[in-house]
Image (spheres, grey):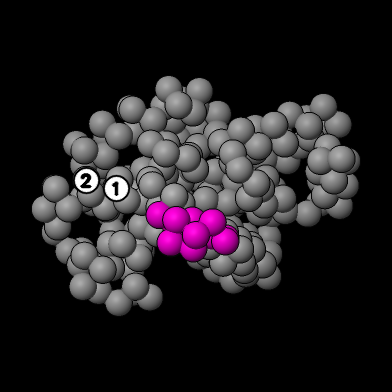
């Protein structure tokens, strides 16, 4: 059933946004289904990791006493546990938070799904909200809006891993550019090395 749906999407040249967990596995599986059918286009297959970025910026804004609407925090890696790596060193606006706060915010971002589900007593999560944000960004890109950038789990050469979440520039062809990691703090570099075995 899933493979039939995926093949229909790819044959229609649709952008495919995978939000079903585990995203770290469903995206590579979908890629293999498309490859088998001869319809794979790496620019049109996305793992939706927007929820991690929404959590990171919300938690950061609270600690930095900033307006959450003005905050941006790139989140790279994957979409589960320690594979989620928020890059608070690149957050805007800059707040120069102490390392213990950064470590706590990182852990909270990684465990954010559990926190929300517990707060809602098992009656839902914020997944649909994050999906809507990412779908809207894709539509803007398709419509030619310039400089639409979101984090997403895509086929990538940013690391040695075949799929990796990082900032991507969206456009009329889907992924127009998979962006690099930029400068990492020592803590983030260690986190990057720790998450790699989990994504292999």
Is residue 180 at least partly visible in the picture? no
Quarter containing the N terminus: top right
Which residue is tagged 1?
A: 106
Q: Are marks 1 and 2 in contact (CB under 8 Å)?
A: yes
Q: Is residue 116 magenta?
A: yes
Residue 99 as seen in the image, left or right of residue 189: left
Residue 86 placed where, x, y %?
A: 34, 48
Kind of element beneath mark 1: helix
Q: Is residue 25 above or below residue 131?
A: above
Name the residue rendered at 49%, 43% in the picture: 79
Residue 61 placed where, x, y %?
A: 28, 68
Which residue is tagged 2?
A: 103
Q: In the image shown, does 16 or 124 lie closer to the viewer?
A: 124
Residue stretch in magenta: 115-125
Residue 116 placed where, x, y %?
A: 45, 58
Is residue 72 at least partly visible in the picture? yes
Name the residue rendered at 57%, 61% in the picture: 123
Residue at the left extreme of this rendering: 98
Kind of element beneath mark 2: helix
Q: Is residue 87 above or below residue 60?
A: above
Q: Is residue 57 magenta?
A: no
Residue 30 placed where, x, y %?
A: 72, 36
Name the residue rendered at 57%, 60% in the picture: 124
Q: Please tell me how crowded label 2 is: few (under 14), some (14-19), or many (20+) other residues with Cα within 10 Å.
A: some
Q: Please tell me how crowded label 1 is: few (under 14), some (14-19), or many (20+) other residues with Cα within 10 Å.
A: many
Q: Is residue 74 above or below residue 158?
A: below
Name the residue rendered at 14%, 59% in the picture: 96
Q: CA distance from mark 1 to mark 2?
A: 5 Å
Q: In the image shown, does 47 or 39 lie closer to the viewer?
A: 47
Numbered mark located on residue 157 in the image: none
């Amino acid at each position: 059933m899933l493979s039939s749906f995926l093949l229909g999407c790819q044959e229609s040249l649709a952008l495919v946004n995978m939000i079903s967990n585990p995203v770290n596995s469903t995206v590579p599986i979908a890629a293999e289904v498309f490859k088998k059918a001869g319809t794979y286009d790496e620019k049109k297959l996305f793992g939706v990791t927007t929820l991690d970025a929404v959590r990171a910026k919300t938690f950061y804004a609270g600690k930095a006493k900033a307006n959450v609407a003005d905050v941006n925090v790139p989140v790279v890696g994957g979409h589960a546990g320690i594979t989620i790596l928020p890059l608070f060193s690149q957050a805007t606006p800059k707040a120069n938070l102490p390392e213990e706060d950064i470590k706590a915010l990182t852990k909270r971002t990684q465990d954010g799904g559990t926190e929300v589900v517990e707060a809602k007593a098992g009656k839902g999560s914020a997944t649909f909200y994050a999906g809507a944000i990412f779908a809207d960004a894709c539509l803007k890109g398709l419509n030619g809006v310039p400089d639409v950038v979101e984090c997403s789990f895509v086929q990538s050469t940013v690391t040695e891993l075949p799929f990796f979440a990082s900032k991507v520039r969206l456009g009329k062809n889907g992924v127009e550019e998979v962006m690099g990691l930029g400068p990492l703090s020592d803590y983030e570099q260690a986190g990057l090395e720790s998450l790699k075995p989990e994504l292999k």
